[in-house]
Image (cartoon, grey):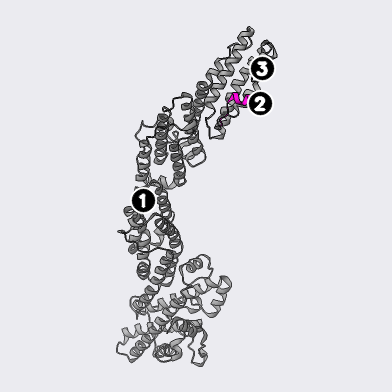
């Protein structure tokens, strides 16, 4: 019968009232569950045996699916929770009586009758178990189960001995509905029903039939869930043929799948399995291993296959995808370790760890390749205007993004030895005051040092020495800015930053001295000393010429960093304008006529400050042309 048709019968056909039958007393029989010796401590009278078998017969025959069309299409647990748990109670009592008869009178006709009833009852419970699992797929999905386990305030407990305290009656269901949401309520009820059936069938020796149904239905749910998450078998022999876009999509799906599968899919299934088969540790382990092991192994093997087989993972940019995958497993490791704690699922934990190991090896290899690429970079063309080199941009962008994964990198490099002692100058050693700096700090510092050494070499390609100093100042300032604005600041430390900031200032001083030294040299040492008019006119003319020449050379210089640009302008303006102003204010009156003043003293101190304010932005305007435009 189609599922839809079965559901309509299960949920719309009403059974006759149980009161039409002789109702067994719920509290009339009470005796302990037999232990190793089934008959020990039990002393049943014939009347008690007859009553147990009679009570069981009433319910078992009523719900015999072979004897009644009504029983064949109706769910006992759906019709009446109370009656369903009376059924289980009667079967448990019957089981105890049969244990007693086996020990006391193994040829008894009552034992034969009890055995016949037990077979019918197990078929009924097997059917109920299947119906609850199949018709509640949507409510027993791992997400619902996980949610229910976190928020339900109702205890799931079904005792073989005390129906009133453990089994769910119709009143219990109503109370549960007041405590939890509709979805959680259905999930709660279904789990409790499954648990009570499983315990009854296991104690009656029918564990195999119960477990077989459970494994088939629940494994299909896990497999379906993995398929919806985009996790499927991926032939390792074909992975190198997959293009980058498809591979990126698969990685994105996998990252999402790890989180969902760990926190919801596998976690929910583990909770359900632990609840339903709480009575038997071995059955719980067997069921969960059968249901989840294959899917989990497939999930956690993906990174290892990817790293080993994909040619697309030789690029340095792929280190970030690897770190994302490493993070996904490591962040969820406590849950993975807990969920797959059984000995039979140890291979899942091993697979997850192996993937972490392979990812770590690949990350270390890619970082080593990145370091080699810096050392091998051999471009000799100077950057126009002494700007920031593309190598500096590439390396610092890469490192700043890498340090977003500082904790992961610390794990990956925990056993890697730092660069050989003595290769790093003392102030290059990150957090030098702390001997506990993780190895990744030393590796990052080493890569930055390699970059700085390469920049020193590239500065030598400038014919203009002043530009080489500006180039070094610009590039080192970019390095520091990237360190300041990323997690690199925590890896390299304040001492490292302070030392290199001092180097930037020194480069800036050297640039100013070399680039503008001739301008300063045109002015006398004693700016206020009285000099002849001809000498004053010569000094003004030489100053104008030297300033114009220096400006022409430096007008195309660039300083991308706003802070450094303003500091350079301010330093140069303060030094040059102050000395020129003192000379200008003292000697301009000695020049003579207005004609001579216009010819020799073309610039006021304010004009000089104005022109210097245009520097380091890459402008192409000269002092002479600007002066003519202003005077015109």
Is residue 61 covered in magenta? no
Q: Please identify the quadrant where the C terminus is shown.
A: top right
Report helix, strand or loop for mark 3. helix
| Residue underneath mark 3 | 598
Instruction: Say which residue appears at 34% left-offset and 82% top-offset.
Output: 99
Nearest the eye: 347 or 39: 347
| Residue underneath mark 2 | 630
Q: Relative to residue 35, is residue 310 depicted above or below?
A: above
Q: Earlier in the sequence, mark 3 or mark 1?
A: 1
Q: CA distance from mark 3 to mark 1?
A: 70 Å
Q: Answer few, some or many: residues within 10 Å of disc 1's Cα (few below 14, many 20 plus, some between 14 and 19).
A: many
Q: Residue 57 at x, y = what percent? A: 42, 90
Instruction: Say which residue appears at 36% left-offset and 49% top-offset.
Output: 360
- Identify the mark at residue 313; answer none if there is no mark: 1
Instruction: Say which residue appears at 49% left-offset and 26% top-offset.
Output: 507
Q: CA distance from mark 1 to mark 2?
A: 60 Å
Report helix, strand or loop for mark 1. helix
Q: CA distance from mark 2 to mark 3?
A: 13 Å
Residue interval drawn in magenta? 619-632
Q: Answer few, some or many: residues within 10 Å of disc 2's Cα (few below 14, many 20 plus, some between 14 and 19).
A: few
Is residue 624 covered in magenta? yes
Nearest the eye: 547 or 299: 547
Nearest the eye: 491 or 30: 491
Q: Residue 573 at x, y = what percent? A: 60, 24
Main SS, magenta residues: helix
Q: Residue 423 at x, y = what percent? A: 36, 32
Evaluate if marks 1 and 2 touch, with contact meaning CB atoms under 8 Å apart.
no
């Amino acid at each position: 019968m189609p599922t839809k048709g079965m559901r309509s019968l299960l949920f719309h056909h009403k059974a006759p009232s149980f009161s039409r039958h002789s109702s067994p007393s719920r509290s009339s029989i009470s005796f302990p569950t037999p232990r190793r010796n089934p008959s020990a401590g039990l002393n049943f009278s014939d009347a008690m045996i007859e009553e147990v078998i009679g009570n069981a017969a009433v319910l078992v025959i009523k719900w015999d699916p072979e004897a009644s069309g009504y029983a064949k299409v109706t769910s006992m647990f759906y019709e009446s929770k109370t009656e369903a748990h009376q059924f289980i109670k009667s079967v448990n009592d019957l089981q105890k009586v049969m244990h007693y008869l086996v020990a006391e009178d193994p040829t008894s006709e009552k034992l034969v009758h009890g055995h016949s009833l037990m077979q019918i009852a197990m078929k009924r419970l097997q059917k109920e178990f299947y119906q609850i699992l199949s018709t509640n797929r949507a409510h027993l999905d791992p997400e619902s189960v996980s949610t229910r386990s976190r928020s339900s305030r109702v205890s799931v407990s079904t005792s073989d001995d005390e129906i009133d305290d453990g089994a769910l009656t119709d009143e219990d269901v109503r109370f549960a509905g007041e405590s939890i949401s509709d979805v959680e309520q259905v999930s709660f009820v279904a789990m409790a029903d499954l648990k009570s059936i499983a315990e009854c069938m296991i104690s009656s020796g029918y564990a195999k039939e119960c477990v077989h149904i459970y494994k088939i239905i629940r494994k299909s749910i896990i497999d379906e869930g993995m398929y919806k998450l985009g996790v499927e078998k991926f032939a390792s022999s074909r992975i190198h043929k997959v293009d980058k876009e498809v591979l990126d999509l698969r990685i994105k799906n996998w990252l999402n799948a790890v989180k969902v599968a760990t926190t919801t899919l596998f976690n929910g299934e583990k909770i359900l399995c632990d609840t339903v088969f709480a009575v038997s540790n071995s059955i719980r382990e067997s069921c969960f291993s059968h249901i989840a092991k294959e899917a989990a192994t497939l999930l956690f093997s993906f990174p290892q296959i990817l790293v080993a087989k994909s040619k697309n993972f030789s690029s340095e940019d792929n280190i970030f995808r690897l770190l994302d995958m490493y993070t996904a497993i490591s962040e969820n490791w406590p849950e993975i370790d807990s969920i797959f704690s059984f000995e039979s699922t140890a291979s899942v934990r091993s697979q997850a760890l192996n993937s972490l190991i392979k990812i770590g090896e690949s990350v270390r290899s890619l970082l080593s390749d990145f370091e080699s690429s810096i050392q091998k970079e051999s471009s000799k063309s100077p950057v126009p205007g002494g700007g920031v080199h593309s190598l500096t941009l590439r390396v610092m962008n890469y490192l700043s993004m890498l340090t977003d994964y500082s904790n992961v990198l610390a794990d990956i490099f925990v056993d890697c030895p730092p660069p050989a002692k003595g290769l790093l100058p003392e102030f290059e050693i990150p957090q030098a005051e702390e001997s506990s700096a993780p190895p990744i700090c030393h590796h990052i510092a080493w890569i930055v040092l390699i970059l700085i050494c390469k920049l020193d070499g590239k500065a030598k390609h400038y014919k203009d020495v002043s530009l080489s100093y500006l180039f070094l100042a610009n590039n080192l300032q970019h390095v520091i800015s990237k360190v300041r604005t990323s997690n690199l600041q925590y890896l390299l430390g304040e001492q490292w930053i302070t030392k290199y900031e001092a180097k930037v200032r020194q480069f800036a001083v050297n640039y100013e001295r070399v680039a503008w030294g001739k301008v300063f040299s045109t002015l006398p040492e004693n700016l206020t000393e009285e000099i002849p008019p001809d000498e004053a006119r010569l000094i003004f003319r030489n100053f104008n010429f030297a300033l114009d020449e220096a400006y022409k050379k430096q007008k195309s210089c660039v300083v991308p960093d706003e802070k450094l640009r303003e500091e350079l302008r301010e330093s140069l303006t303060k030094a040059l304008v102050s000395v020129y102003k003192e000379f200008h204010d003292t000697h301009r009156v000695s020049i003579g006529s207005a004609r001579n003043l216009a010819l020799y003293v073309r610039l006021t101190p304010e004009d000089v400050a104005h022109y210097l304010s245009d520097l380091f932005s890459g402008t192409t305007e000269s002092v002479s042309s600007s002066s003519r435009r202003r005077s015109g």
